[in-house]
Image (cartoon, grey):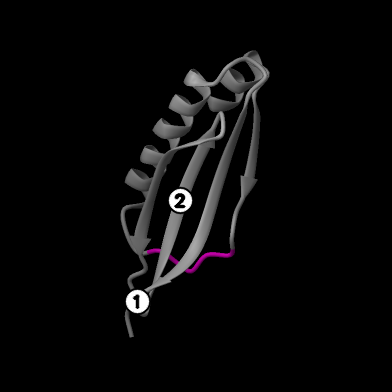
Amino acid sequence: MQESSATNKDIEISTNLADLPDIVGDAERIGQAIGNLLNNAIKFSKKSGKVIIETKCLDIEGKENVLFNIYYSACIIWNFCVNRLVSS
């Protein structure tokens, strides 16, 4: 759905994805949240706009975390950090 909506509005979607550790969590819910926010970024972008999806791996207080950002029209519309859960 995102691809056809972006194509109809001539919106370029680009990614800047870091090598990420495995994330233990609800992959379906995380995917759903990212998909919903990507849809909103496309919906509220002007024609011929740009949407950027970015991930980063951060060390916060000695723990690996994954940061997801979605930008459109030079604004961050959403970001969140997911703690990496490691089992030994």
Q: Please identify the quadrant where the C terminus is shown.
A: bottom left
Q: Residues within 10 Å of mark 2 (few under 14, many from 20)?
A: some
N-terminal label among 1 and 2: 2
Residues drawn in magenta: 19-23
Query: Could you tell me which secondary element the residue under label 1 belongs to?
Result: loop
The numbered dot on residue 66 is none
Tell me the residue at 37%/38% (across/down). Answer: 32
Residue 54 locus on image (x, y percent)? 55, 49
Query: Could you tell me which secondary element the residue under label 2 belongs to?
Result: strand
Q: In the rendered structure, which amino acid carries the disc numbered 2? A: Phe
Q: Is residue 6 above or below residue 28?
A: above
Structural distance between the alpha carbons of marks 1 and 2 = 19 Å
Q: Which residue is mark 2?
A: 68
Tell me the residue at 54%/31% (across/down). Answer: 72
User: On the rendered structure, is 62 left or right of 8?
Assistant: left
Residue 45 occupies which quadrant of the picture? Answer: top right
Q: In the rendered structure, which amino acid carries the disc numbered 1? A: Val
User: On the rendered structure, is 32 left or right of 51?
Assistant: left
Tell me the residue at 56%/28% (across/down). Answer: 73
Residue 30 locus on image (x, y percent)? 37, 47
User: On the rendered structure, is 58 left or right of 3?
Assistant: left
Q: Is residue 26 above or below residue 33?
A: below
Residue 79 locus on image (x, y percent)? 40, 46
Per the image, is 22 magenta? yes
Tell me the residue at 49%/65% (across/down). Answer: 57
Q: Which residue is mark 1?
A: 86
Per the image, is 10 magenta? no
User: So how many labels did they put on this image?
Assistant: 2
Magenta stretch: dominant secondary structure: loop
Q: Is residue 57 above or below residue 44?
A: below
Q: Is residue 73 above or below residue 17?
A: above
Answer yes or no: do the residues labelled 1 and 2 have beta carbons within 8 Å? Answer: no
